[in-house]
Amino acid sequence: MAHPLIPQVIELATPVAESIGLEVVGAAFHTNYNPPVLRIDIRNPAQDTGLDDCEQMSRVLEATLDAAGIIPDRYVLEISSPGVSHLLTNDRDFSSFKGFPVVVSTIELNQTQRDWHGKLVRRDETAVYLNQKGRTIKIAREQVMKVQLDEER
């Protein structure tokens, strides 16, 4: 369960991140540490997220959080990249993971879910293409619920 301050933190952090070309992708407040740790995960949509991105976000967000005063006690602000997301959501993800094993979850016409396993070939406006044992499978995008990296293969 998320800490009750997380929605406020995200509301403050999102415009700060956008102002420096970043995205907020997650937040957690770990109160079991002394002092508590507020962790904000960011992503640079234009390139790999680097240490400079984290440092810049930390400097700007720290001032914003202090001015807002929503965290009354001492805490540690930690800015990091969430690493590789297992869910493919944008063109950059589909380009970066071409040839990787993925699972495409679909909803069929009869409302049953089906998972397709294969290596990602590409995605275009109409379909996602997988290679299954040398054969290309075309899956209509309107049936695709999600595409994620297949950790088991």
Image (cartoon, rainbow, N blue to C red):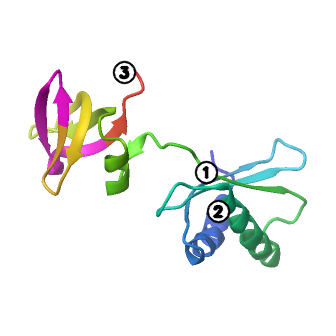
Magenta residues, dominant SS class: strand
Q: Quadrant of residue 129?
A: top left
- Mark with earlier residue (3, 1): 1
**What kind of residue is marked 2?**
Asp
Question: Spatial distance from mark 2 to mark 3, Cα to Cα?
Answer: 32 Å
- Secondary structure of the residue carrying tag 2 is helix
Given residues 60 and 64, the one toward you in this image is 60
Residue 38: x and y in percent read 75, 54
Compared to residue 77, the image places residue 123 above or below, namely above
- State the mark number for residue 153: 3
Label 2 CA crowd tier, 10 Å (few <14, some 14–19, many 20+): many
| Image quarter hosting the N terminus | top right
Tell me if I can see residue 88 in this picture: yes
Residue 73, located in which quarter of the rendered image?
Answer: bottom right
According to the picture, the residue beneath numbered tag 1 turns out to be 81
Q: Amino acid at mark 1?
A: Ser
Bounds of the magenta span?
130-146
Q: Secondary structure at mark 1?
A: loop
Residue at label 2?
53
Q: Residue at x 73, y 62 (%)?
A: 55
